[in-house]
Amino acid sequence: MAFPHRLDAPELPDFSMLKRLARDQLIYLLEQLPGKKDLFIEADLMSPLDRIANVSILKQHEVDKLYKVENKPAVSSSEQLCFLVRPRIKNMRYVASLVNADKLAGRTRKYKVIFSPQKFHACEMVLEEEGVYGDVSCDEWAFSLLPLDVDLLSMELPEFFRDYFLEGDQRWINTVAQALHLLSTLYGPFPNCYGIGRCAKMSYELWRTLEEEEDGETKGRRPEIGHIFLLDRDVDFVTALCSQVVYEGLVDDTFRIKCGSVDFGPEVTSSDRSLKVLLNAEDKVFNEIRNEHFSNVFGFLSQKARNLQAQYDRRRGMDIKQMKNFVSQELKGLKQEHRLLSVHIGACESIMKKKTKQDFQELIKTEHALLEGFNIRESTSYIEEHIDRQVSPIESLRLMCLLSITENGLIPKDYRSLKTQYLQSYGPEHLLTFSNLRRAGLLTEQAPGDTLTAMESKVSKLVTDKAAGKITDAFSSLAKRSNFRAISKKLNLIPRVDGEYDLKVPRDMAYVFSGAYVPLSCRVIEQVLERRSWQGLDEVLRLLNCSELAFTDMTKEDKASSESLRLILVVFLGGCTFSEISALRFLGREKGYRFIFLTTAVTNSARLMEAMSEVKA
Amino acid sequence: MDCYTANWNPLGDSAFYRKYELYSMDWDLKEELRDCLVAAAPYGGPLVSLLRKPWRKEKAASVTAVLEIYSASACLWPWKSGPVVSLGWSAEEELLCVQEDGGVLVYGLHGDFRRHFSMGNEVLQNRVLDARIFHTEFGSGVAILTGAHRFTLSANVSDLKLRRMPEVPGLQGAPTCWTALCQDRVAHILLAVGPDLYLLDQSACSAVTPFGLAPGVSSFLQMAVSFTYRHLALFTDTGYIWMGTASLKEKLCEFNCNIRAPRSRWCSRPRSKERAVVVAWERRLMVGVMRPRASSILGGLFVLDEDSYLVPELDGVRIFSRSTHEFLHEVPVASEEIFKIASMAPGALLLEAQKEYEAASFGKCFLDRFPPDSFVRMCQDLRVLNAIRDYHIGIPLTYSQYKQLTIQVLLDRLVLRRLYPLAIQICEYLRLPEVQGVSRILAHGPVQQKDVSDEDVARAINQKLGDTPGVSYSDIAARAYGCGRTELAIKLLEYEPRSGEQVPLLLKMKRSKLALSKAIESGDTDLVFTVLLHLKNELNRGDFFMTLRNQPMALSLYRQFCKHQELETLKDLYNQDDNHQELGSFHIRASYAAEERIEGRVAALQTAADAFYKAKNEFAAKATEDQMRLLRLQRRLEDELGGRFLDLSLHDTVTTLILGGHNKRAEQLARDFRIPDKRLWWLKLTALADLEDWEELEKFSKSKKSPIGYLPFVEICMKQHNKYEAKKYASRVGPEQKVKALLLVGDVAQAADVAIEHRNEAELSLVLSHCTGATDGATADKIQRARAQAQKK
């Protein structure tokens, strides 16, 4: 069922080199602290670390005990302590408290902090303020790209989304630029570059500066990756906010895929233990269903099971020699397949139980209504009921945001009443959540557009320059509203379907949302790749409020040959969803491209909403 | 060429000495040389002269002494200054003027005042009797003899550490002569008091006797140390000269002559077997060469026309007087081999051959296996040496001095003399890399030109350098700043492509705001943060915040930092900006994160509400006030009913009350907080079903017409697996949802009837999908029939 790639589709580069690089660097850093040492690892780094170097490698380099960095005093008795952390102030305070406790106890040990992917000045500053800067040696583990799959690189920086899109903190841009620099050093220059969004633009420019500073390295190398496309998450919030219905996305929404693997609980494994399963192209069963609409998956799996049974059944007519052959050559593979099959069937059942209830159908129906822009009143009441019944704080929030973005903001009455209801259901601290969502442009109040600019110019005349600047800012944040409806029309995001949309044989990327909606992000990428520029997309850019923030950059030399390269790197700043990945994989198969995905983290609607939520500590 | 050896004087076994004129002096000395304090820097360095008299004898301020600085060819820069005891040049060619009070003034080559340091209080009190400037491997040192006959020295004037030397026991008057020695990286003082010699080091004063000193010495008059501090010559009042190692432990030779009051200098070539001392007295110059195995010495005598001054060099002695400047040295082996009469050395033969055939660089072509590099390099070096020996440049270096000095230092010296074009030409001629060469010269050079506008200099430098890799504009800018040309430095930094290099210098120059915008431009948040911390310490809080206000990127960065590390500052930031919305949020967060007591929390909320009002965010203000009410109420509930109410949402509070059986209270609360009917019904329904209080639920369902319909009742009863109760409500469900309700309670047959009655296709298929197997076979048939009928119509 999984569609084969066109024969002329390019080969994917070998990204395992990135892992080796990261591993070697880590080992080098560990060896900088010779002798036995205890390693304190930040929780968020544990899974990525596991993909790079397992415990036995750590032990080989004299790591004695492993601890998790948490808000508890450490009981390590080692003479050397090594901390592997993200550059966060909270972690610095943890290290400082440990060192200071040792000092009080009159104990001297060696401390080393390894920051990943880089060190920030603010961290050293905190160490200094806490009076331990001299006691601690600092290093950087420039591990910024984790290959989660053959075509998926993740920076594993979920905080990027909140830091940049909410707090306006640009600290990770440098990390992105460094990551791009690493890729171009390893896999050749990128001859054609496109991008959209403020962050994309800044990252790109910073990366170019890096390349220029160290020029000569990639010069003369034959490019492997022909095109690179950078995209800010806020260009398309809609897609990320939709419920996912392709298998991989659905597994992520339901069980949360973490760093390329998922913990299936007892309800999936139908035993009393949970099972950690690595989800990538090496899992043959998964690889065939990951991009499929969920409605096809069950049928496929049962067909597969029947085939498997038939394979097993062949044993019956075998003589001894054939049997020997079968056992030694095929049985192992069949057993492996069997195991995987039962895992995914279990997962499917569990998802069916959760999702095919009437509730889910209605939810999807409401989402589609919002995307298509009909029955808005009904959808609004649906959301209200959702909140009143305390179905799920995150889901409610997601629906409110979806309503806001597709409708250019909520009308004032709904804005107030939905918020009030939400606060009553989930507590007053969400006043801050709403303030966050508003700042990020996810949940806003409709403003009468025409009077706005008139008023703006009127007010600007009355006040001083500085105040005028502030007012313009305020207006532009108001004006930064989604024009989803117009964009949708312009880019034909809602396919007109005569009769049933055949999800088994999809004809466009809309299949990832049951044929109801083509992901905006993917459509933009498709259009730009087709035109090899932003030409003719001016209106779309204007509607996206990105007129100044889209760019194209092509190297002049051997334009023709580089254009023919069909390996495309798509960089999602702020995270991408599995649905988008599936959609682009589909596009790639159709057009003979091969997409490689680089994302700050794999995300979904729940993660986005959680990033915006204020919770009591 | 024939007379090349004319001025060679054979001395000793194998060496020739040669004295030749470097320049005829063009200086305008008004006084006799002997009336002046004179100092010359080694390596063909500049000369300085200062009239001794005025401030020695008359202290009248009206008479000004004139300090004059000359190049080796004596055509430089007259200039004026105050009273000085001793003059000397540092290794960096800075002029050190030791004043009577122990103050040392440091001047540049151009007479520009650089800095000033003092040799300490003791020196200040006792005045300076005598002072020497000496050179060590660390730099240049100053040794002072005070009026109290104590010595103070500093081994390196650029890293001033004063060392007071121990007292010489029984010393009454000034020592007859003394010198600074440098051995094993430590500076010592060797002094003579009459016939006794003392060596002063850091800790002790020890009497020393030179090995093999002839008896009958009544007083040492002079001592001379060689350029490398390896050898020492002592002169006594009887005209006896002892020569040996500086440690005094080995005698090289001794001899007698009839000289009184000599001035003497060592004159020897490195690695030469010969050691020679040049002794000058009364316009006569004697070269004393010792013969290692003989106790006698050969003396060559030169007659001088004028009073002269001797400057020791690495491989010879410079001798200058009012009118001439000469160099006396041992003829190098190479020259000797070539030019010695009847020399048969290859070089000499080659020279002969070259003369014969008039072919320049002859022979080179025959040596195909011999790489031409060294030949080429030598030619280049000679050209450079000739160029700098030019009268206008006035740096007479010998080849060995040049090699010792290195080309880099030579370039620096040219730059110091502002001879930029020559320096650049040399760089280009020698093809030095940009970093070492041109950019370095420009870094030192043009930025020191005061008469050209900043703009022009910056542009000129950029035109010269372009974007050549390896050129560091920030280095050049740093130099400009060092010369006090801040504006030029800023202009130059504009050309620096790496912001990481721009920012630190801008900070150093106290252009923090510019540094901030540069850092922001760079996109490197770390750089921005560095500047921020700098600004924070440099500016007062108000100005700091004002600066931040105009830089949103920096502001958000700093806010992030404050959120974790300095909450109070965060509040101040919002206050300063009149950002009431954020202030409100800040206090809301404080109300549950920072405050423990309920009063504190309510107070925080009140502040938040006030802020929201100011921000014209009435919704938030009202919501906050509601929360205050709720908190107080929850507190009361906890007191009165027990259990946990604090921090529950309004919805959960009401639910908890119902679950606890406090229905009255729950209703009161719902009224007080204007909970909408729909929510209240959902809430009660869920709570009562959870309690399985079916009776109360039924009562509730009949209290009035349900605003949410009755389907939810059916659903919730079924969730609790109570089909009996569910059926009760199924009958009350409105017609639109009737089918769904009936299906929920499992009454497929009746659902089919209703659907058929409604003639609703969607409902029909829904029922059909619920028909399972045999039991519902009849129903399914019924539906199919109804469908068929409908289609017929």
Image: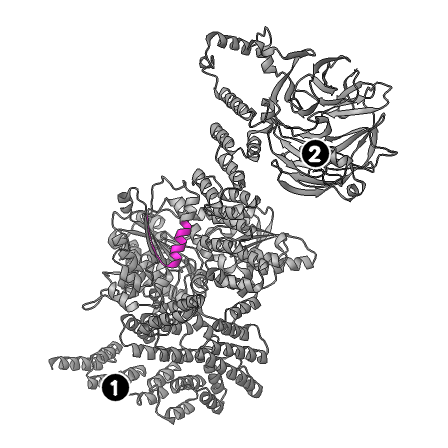
Is residue B229 visible to us here? no
Q: Which residue is mark 1?
A: B750
Residue B766 — which label? Answer: none
Residue B429: horizontal and vertical position, in percent? Answer: 47, 28
Is residue A261 shown above or below B722? Answer: above
Outermost residue, front side: B62
Residue A246: horizontal and vertical position, in percent? Answer: 32, 63
Q: Which residue is mark 2?
A: B87
Of B369 and B194, the residue lying toward us: B194
Is residue B297 visible to us here? yes
Whether marks 1 and 2 lie on the same chain: yes
Closer to the chain start, of discs 1 and 2, is 2
Q: Is residue A202 magenta?
A: yes
Q: Is residue B781 magenta?
A: no
Q: Which residues are magenta?
A: A192-207
Of A193 and B449, the residue lying toward us: B449
Q: Chain of mark 2?
A: B
Is residue A281 shown above or below B540? Answer: above
- What predominant SS class does the magenta segment belong to? helix
Which one is closest to the eye, mark 1 or mark 2? 2
